[in-house]
Image (cartoon, coloured by chain):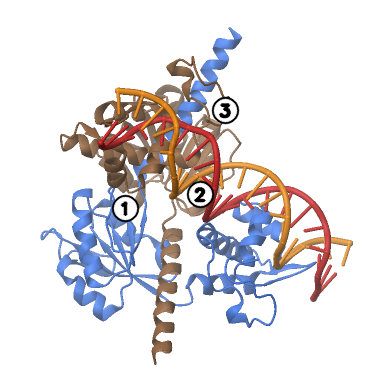
Chain colours: A blue, B brown, C orange, D red
Amino acid sequence: MGSAGGRKSGGTREERAERGIPEATVARLPVYLRALTALSDHDVTTASSEDLAVWAGVNSAKLRKDLSYLGTYGTRGVGYDVNYLRYQIAREIGLTQDWSVVIVGIGNLGLALANYSGFASRGFRVAALLDNDERRIGEQVGDLRISPLDDLFELVRSGQVSIGVIATPAAAAQGVCDKLVAAGVSSILNFAPTLLSVPDHVDVRKVDLSIELQILAFHEQRKAAGLAELKVDVG
Amino acid sequence: MGSAGGRKSGGTREERAERGIPEATVARLPVYLRALTALSDHDVTTASSEDLAVWAGVNSAKLRKDLSYLGTYGTRGVGYDVNYLRYQIAREIGLTQDWSVVIVGIGNLGLALANYSGFASRGFRVAALLDNDERRIGEQVGDLRISPLDDLFELVRSGQVSIGVIATPAAAAQGVCDKLVAAGVSSILNFAPTLLSVPDHVDVRKVDLSIELQILAFHEQRKAAGLAELKVDVG
DNA sequence: CATTGTGAAGTGATTCACAGCA
DNA sequence: TGCTGTGAATCACTTCACAATG
């Protein structure tokens, strides 16, 4: 099996999986990590794929297949060692190192992100808060001060910033994105409701609140339509 | 084609598609809507699937197939009428009616959401802001006041609230979710980093900032590893 | 002997490629 | 002629079901 190669035996641990983890699996690894952390907090030391799957909200076959892309970390007849597996997943995601994040656009959302404790707790360090509005520059937010956008180059070079978060209005987002890319940032999380153009080597993930609401509205409408139809049928 | 039925001719407009739009397509409809709005703002009246696809950031075959689930809204040899298609998609999503939203948990994130103009601009009306913290209750935010969580029942019944947004800490989220469901809300947007259990008829969508960052970190790590390998290979 | 790890089958989404139509 | 709409082919992901095994 495995999407690359078909080498069956003799592989060292390093060779075993290490290429081509499906994107859908990658997106679930953080969920498994959170489930494992919860189990660990509850002093659970061993968990079956079924236990873990319940905590993660997926089915157990999927969970086992996902884990099989990382390596062979379970014990047949027993299950998985919670802390060992947790470490392996954290390592796979890259959370054994710290990642520095710049937040650009310190409006309501940018402020909320700057204060969000979930970043720090998972190895993401907010290294700087940038904004273009001269009136905001110098303002203290937590233990950081808002800096002008042009500090970006210096920050990236000195501070090893590797992830940029865009929380500006839509109209400013592409310009900010271009500056991030020019400064050498190759991973961007975009909260602005607009499509960003970037070179191939740059990864963009998008979080769009109004799209999420629209998807909910679509389904809600379908449910309502279903009920209405039922009423008509019945009388 | 079409996942239900196979009736080929004689269908009225109402019968034509109306069942089983693939989930992946549903998730893109808001993107197309935004692209069409942008084109309309630029006074473009007609667009080919290729034009639209560029604005939406997808490939044109996918866009055409997606639109084909809604009906036959294009003209061969010409393209799509921007405003007509925009209306049809808005109608399909359910944006020809207004949707009322309650935001629960008025911390930094809840405040940002309460002030987010992108909601109002797309037919989502923030009907109420709820929090459990007595010190916050009565506080003015925009033109709303923060109310206690227990107002939920009354609000849902009187105000036709149909979407609940959870912006509480993780520990409070399931309790809030249960109250929303008990009050009759069947669409929930969850920002708390936790898995919610809900009955089958309730839709939950999840926005998880730290998961998004972790996915970026995974790919960033892979890129870095690739570079390192290259360096070793070259010398 | 309970549970993993995984081939094989099944399901769903994307892309191709072109017939059909304005 | 140029572009849509869509079967058919492909690709990706999920689920099944069971042999392998600590």
**Secondary element at image label 2:** helix
Res A44 visible: yes
Amino acid under disc 3: Ala
| Disc on res. B4 | 3
Decide if residue A38 is on the left or right side of residue B204: right
* Protein chain holding label 3: B
Of the pair B71 and B212, the residue shown nearer to us: B71
Amino acid under disc 1: Phe
| Camera-side mark, 3 or 1 | 3
Q: Residues within 10 Å of mark 1 (few under 14, many from 20)?
A: many
Judging by the rendered image, the residue that carries numbered circle 2 is: B172
Percent x, y of residue B26: 44, 37
Of the pair B175 and A106, the residue shown nearer to us: A106
Residue B145, by quadrant, is top left
- Tell me what residue is drawn at x 20 percent, y 34 percent: B40
- Tell me what residue is drawn at x 39 percent, y 92 percent: B235
Amino acid under disc 2: Ala
Find the distance from the CA under tag 3 to the CA under tag 1. 36 Å
Decide if residue B10 is on the left or right side of residue A52: left
